[in-house]
Amino acid sequence: MLNPLALELNHVIEERNKPVYEMFSLLGKSLYFPKGIVSQAGEARGKADIFNATIGMATKGGQPIYLDVIHKNLSGYDPKDLYPYAPPAGKPELREVWRKKLLKDNPSLEGKDYGIPIVTSGLTHGLSIVSDLFVDKGDSIILPDKYWDNYQILFNVRHGSETVTYPLFTKANEFNVEGLLEALLSCKNGKAILVLNFPHNPTGYTPTEKEAEEILEAIREAADYGINIVAVMDDAYFGLYYEDSIKESIFARLVGLHPRVLPIKVDGATKEEYAWGFRVGFLTFGTHDPLVLDALEKKAMGSIRSTISCSPHLSQTIILDALLNPEFEMQRNERNKVMEDRAKRVKEILADGKYADEFEPYPFNSGYFVSLKINNSDAEALRVHLLNQYGVGTVSLAKTDLRIAFSCVELNYLDCLFELIYQSCKELNPCSLKL
């Protein structure tokens, strides 16, 4: 029997947006934010002006109690912005600032309604919340044939879904929109969880303007066909665009696209602000009805409350401080330029065909990575050889695919890196040496 609070949220969503209700997993329908300790403490915060004996926290003189050995490294911050529990959905000021950032970075959101970003403990946590809310056993997760390996655990292992893949690129090395549509239409139960990750890990590809419009049309066509689509944008590498790609998240264009499409943006400071270990991510629902948005937020908060309780307050405070700093944009652009220079050098190195007999790059124009198609060697054998013989770390993804993170290789070492990869290919296949 479902909790009355869950039933209440379900009723609001089913009444006002039935396709979204139909997208929920059994767990998603069961989730709610309890009117328990956290809720009652929040209510007391504004009214308990004599004594507030609600939350499991220690205070003295109206301030949190803390250890000097900890605070000596954080003395520039007010203790109230560090030590108390952050709200389950995140620090309100940070959520509002990130929402404004979304609008600034994604012009297609102008005039559209979408939720206030919910703070997550990194992007993986955001994807896990999506999985809790929407993924059931047997549901189809639509992914390209090259994808981040953690999706398997997030969706299939934890919730029993099944991965349906399509070739990422056509023979003409363009985004395979036809394959995407075919995968969507194959969903027998009328529901699909579509994951779009741009800039893409592992290839470093982001669609062109033309491809983006074709992707939108494919999603619209599948929705017209009657398929409910949870469209998840994994925007981990957002903003790192170098060439002829779209310069905003497809999330912005999916908002309002179709009643059967629920866009969800998962992003964060992890890569965007070069703050990987801070674990500050965001989850944003792209639907217009304020009551539905409120119900979705409460269900997401139920997932957060029942797993991590809340995200770290310290990380949120530091990221908020950075976003409000007048030098923020300049510094981020400077770091992005470092990534762009490396990407362009990689493209130059691979452009003249010097290494084409042994490997060639899949299309890339953004992000941290380039993936190589290895022609004559096993990618895993090549990875091990590079590591053992030359101290070079790479990632093998499939029998033919090797991922290179140029994000962590200095510009002046990139030539040497690819020379070593080429040399290793020859060493693994001596008969391929040119006479």
Image (cartoon, grey):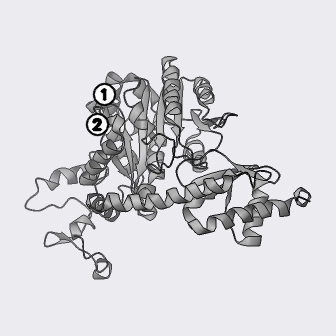
48 to the left or right of 149: left
Horizontal and vertical percent position of residue 433: 88, 59
Q: Which residue type does callout 2 highlight?
A: Asp
> Image height check: is 68 above or below 101?
below
> Image height check: is 328 above or below 7?
below
Q: Nearer the viewer, residue 197 or 227?
A: 197
> Image height check: is 52 above or below 97?
below
Q: Which residue is mark 2?
A: 294
Image quarter hosting the C terminus: bottom right
Q: Residue at x 25, y 51 (%)?
A: 92
Q: Residue at x 66, y 46 (%)?
A: 362
Mark toward the start of the polypeptide (2 vs 1): 1
Quick one: which residue is furthest to the left in this view? 50
Q: Are marks 2 and 1 in contact (CB under 8 Å)?
A: yes
Quick one: which residue is furthest to the top in this view? 225
Q: Which residue is mark 1?
A: 12
Q: Nearer the viewer, residue 114 or 23?
A: 114
Q: Residue at x 59, y 60 (%)?
A: 406
Image quarter hosting the N terminus: top left
Q: Nearer the viewer, residue 211 or 434?
A: 434
Q: From where the camera sits, is residue 156 visible?
A: yes
91 to the left or right of 338: left
Horizontal and vertical percent position of residue 52: 15, 60
Label 1: which secondary element: helix
Q: CA distance from mark 2 to mark 1?
A: 10 Å
Q: Which residue type does callout 1 highlight?
A: Val
When asked about the image quadrant of residue 58, the answer is bottom left
Q: Residues within 10 Å of mark 2 (few under 14, many from 20)?
A: some
